[in-house]
Image: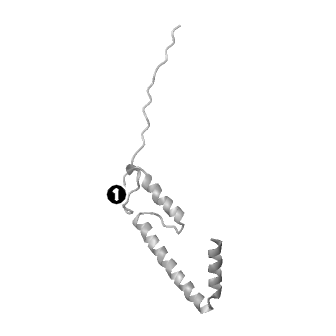
Amino acid sequence: MALNLRDAVKGWNTLSEAERQVYSAKASDLKTEYEKQLHQWATEHHLRFTKNLTVLTQRFYERERKPPGRRESKDPNPSKTTTSTVRSKPHSSKSVSTSA
């Protein structure tokens, strides 16, 4: 790996300034296109976008592991909102008697 990096640095240093600018512009364009496609993929899968692939992958797999009833709505703009109320369990009153 170190040899590959060293060879890449030597190759970069042998390029003229004009060649470096062309290379840098192309690399920037490719990066922009890649990020655009990644953002589109995240949107299609209803994930909050981040450039950090580890976080994006983790978000995807965490959502996929949730049971079907626990998954978030796939509709980003639901037409109606449902609410539920939490009810406490009724307490039974048991009387304790002691015999003397």
Nearer-the-camera pick, 98 or 69: 69
Please tell me which residue lies in front, 53 or 96: 53
Foreground pick, 37 / 46: 37
Quick check: 39 above or below 18?
above
Q: Is 43 located above or below residue 22 in the figure?
A: above
- Image coords of residue 100 (percent x, y): 53, 7
Q: Quadrant of residue 11?
A: bottom right
Amino acid found under the numbered disc labelled 1:
Lys
Q: Image point 51% across, 12% down: which residue?
A: 98
- Where does label 1 land, which residue? 80
Dot 1 falls on a residue whose secondary structure is loop
In the image, residue 12 lies at what x, y percent? 62, 84
Say if 41 sits above or below 85 in the image: below
Residue drawn at x 50%, y 63% as measured from the top left: 56
- Image quadrant where residue 9 sits: bottom right
- x, y percent for residue 61: 46, 57
Looking at the image, which residue sits at the far top? 100
